Image (tube, helix red, strand yellow):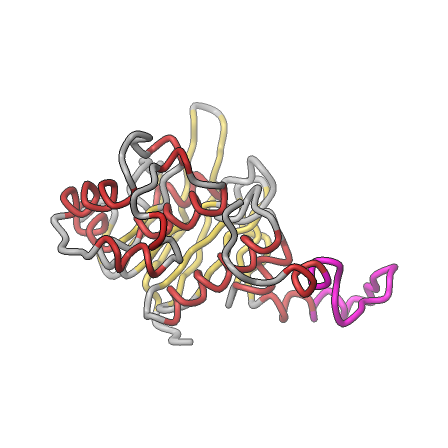
């Protein structure tokens, strides 16, 4: 992993009237890493990401993305990031090919729609409409749209929520492939096994503050060093591994 920071956040605060949603958060995201922002609902992680994405104004603090300040160069930042849309962001009557062409036009980018679909295993769905896709297929397509402008950084907000085990594991492989191709990935997730498997480092937020930041293995080792023991013996596999082994890894229609 390259330890060059591409996102630098210093003493970031966001206040809504008397409510402090983000309370002086500071962290860095390194080039070509998968960085996880974790925390319970209401911890402030979505607000933090939306400020970095230039979608929400901060109250105070400093944020730079690839050397650009969110205060002075928000349009430059928009050109080099990819943000995953929610399902409501797509025209339901357009085919996947037409949607990619539409987004490419908005970005003024030259792309091959079939090649984009092939990257996420949806080339056979090129004539399908977004509303006809399964949950896993919709998530894969939404990730494809974040790559249209060849971003340096992509932001994925709970990308595997509601997916079955195969779709979840396949999406993990896709996210790793995006990172291996040279793109920094920032994700939020409520699945701790997902963060442990995918992320090079994670920041844990609670009540608007970062309360821990390190590699998942390092955080686990720190907990074990306190004398913590799991009540159930940890096996070399879990039930999800059994399920995947029995039912296969391939992309599914459902």
The reply, left or right, for residue 195 in relation to residue 233 is: left
Q: Is residue 144 magenta?
A: no
**Farthest-out residue, top:** 17
Residue at left offset 48%, top offset 41%? 134
Residue 249 position, x and y percent, is: 57, 63
In this rendering, the answer to whether 64 lies above or below 201 is above
Residue 97 position, x and y percent, is: 25, 45
Residue at left offset 33%, top offset 30%? 92
Q: Front-most of 73 and 37?
A: 37
In this rendering, the answer to whether 53 lies above or below 185 is above
Q: Front-most of 206 and 118?
A: 118
Stretch of the chain drawn in magenta: 221-242
Q: Is residue 230 magenta?
A: yes
Residue 82 position, x and y percent, is: 30, 51
Q: How many marks?
A: 0
The reply, left or right, for residue 112 in relation to residue 83 is: left
Residue at left offset 87%, top offset 61%? 232
Q: Front-most of 72 and 103?
A: 103
In this rendering, the answer to whether 181 lies above or below 152 is below
In this rendering, the answer to whether 38 lies above or below 2 is above
Split into 4 quadrants, where in the image is the N terminus? bottom left
Residue at left offset 61%, top offset 41%? 40
Q: Quadrant of residue 59?
A: top left
The reply, left or right, for residue 204 in relation to residue 82 is: right
The reply, left or right, for residue 15 in relation to residue 98 is: right
Q: Quadrant of residue 194?
A: bottom right
Residue 9 position, x and y percent, is: 38, 54
């Amino acid at each position: 992993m390259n330890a060059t920071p591409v996102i630098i956040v210093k003493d970031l605060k966001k206040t809504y009237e008397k409510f402090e949603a983000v309370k002086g958060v500071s962290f860095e995201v390194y080039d070509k890493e998968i960085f996880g922002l974790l925390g319970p609902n209401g911890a402030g992680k979505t607000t933090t990401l939306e400020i970095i994405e230039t979608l929400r104004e901060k109250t105070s603090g400093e944020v730079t993305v690839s050397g650009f300040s969110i205060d002075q160069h928000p349009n430059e930042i928009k050109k080099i990031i990819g943000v995953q849309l929610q399902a409501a962001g797509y025209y339901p009557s357009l085919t996947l090919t037409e949607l990619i062409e539409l987004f490419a036009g908005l970005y003024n980018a030259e792309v091959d729609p079939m090649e984009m679909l092939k990257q996420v295993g949806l080339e056979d769905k090129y004539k399908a409409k977004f509303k006809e896709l399964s949950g896993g297929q919709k998530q894969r397509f939404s990730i494809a749209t974040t790559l249209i402008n060849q971003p340096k950084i992509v932001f994925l907000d709970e990308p595997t929520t509601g997916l079955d085990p195969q779709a979840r594991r396949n999406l993990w492989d896709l996210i790793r492939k995006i990172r291996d191709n040279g793109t920094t990935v920032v994700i939020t997730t409520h699945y701790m096994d997902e963060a442990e498997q995918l992320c090079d480092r994670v920041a844990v937020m609670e009540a608007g503050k970062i309360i821990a930041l390190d590699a998942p293995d390092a955080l686990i080792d720190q907990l074990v060093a306190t004398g913590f023991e799991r009540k159930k013996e940890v096996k070399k596999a879990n039930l999800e591994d059994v399920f995947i082994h029995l039912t296969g890894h391939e992309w599914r229609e459902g």
